[in-house]
Image (cartoon, rainbow, N blue to C red):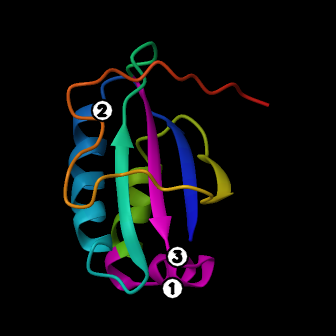
Amino acid sequence: MLTIVTDVHLKEGAEDQWDSIMRERLSAAATQPGWIGGQMLQPTDRPSDRIIVGTWHSRDDWEKWHHDARFEETREELEGLTVEPPMHSWNEVVVDARAEGQHAAKGRRSTSRRKRE
């Protein structure tokens, strides 16, 4: 199981439109073979940034989704709302402590921060 973390920097004022398109994209991803789950995060100290976390059974499953027509439809539109190309990092899942069918972090604030390399 792999997780891809994508760090996106949005143009000022593009947040609502980008969020709406990404919600649709994540809903569509949920129907794809190999999809496990995902999150769209907004850093509390960077309101125009988004972090997308997607968990897949394999990188091959993720690659297939990126060539799907539904994915391709939104690529250009989303890219037009960003300041720069997104940054991706792949991570092997060592432990997945989410409660199945529940939002494990519900009611909790995240205090983790990610530094740029």
Tag 1: amino acid: Lys
First to last magenta residue range: 48-70
Viewer-proximal residue, 76 or 28? Answer: 28
What kind of element bears circle 1? helix
Work out which quarter of the rendered image holds the N terminus and state it.
bottom right
Q: Quadrant of residue 21?
A: bottom left
Question: Which residue is painted at 39% across and 75% down in the image?
Answer: 35
Which quarter of the picture shows residue 30? Answer: bottom left
- Residue 56 lies left or right of residue 12; in this view the side is right
Identity, as a three-letter code, of the amino acid under mark 2: Glu
What residue sits 61% from the left and 76% below the top?
59
Give me the C-alpha separation between circle 3 and circle 2.
Answer: 25 Å
The residue positioned 66% from the left and 56% from the top of the image is 91
Q: Quick one: label 3, few (<14), some, or many (20+) residues within 10 Å?
A: many
Residue corresponding to mark 2: 15
Single out the residue that lies furthest toward the right. Answer: 117
Q: Are marks 1 and 3 in contact (CB under 8 Å)?
A: yes
* Residue wearing tag 1: 64
Q: Quadrant of the C terminus?
A: top right
Q: Nearer the viewer, mark 1 or mark 2?
A: 1
**As shown in the figure, which amino acid type bears the numbered disc 3?**
Trp
Mark 2 or mark 3, which is nearer the start of the sequence? Answer: 2
Q: How many marks?
A: 3
Pick the front one: 24 or 82: 24
Q: Nearer the viewer, residue 58 or 52?
A: 58
Q: Is residue 52 above or below residue 16?
A: below
x then y, percent, for residue 114: 62, 27
Indicate yes or no whether the magenta region holds residue 104: no
The kind of secondary structure element at disc 2 is: helix
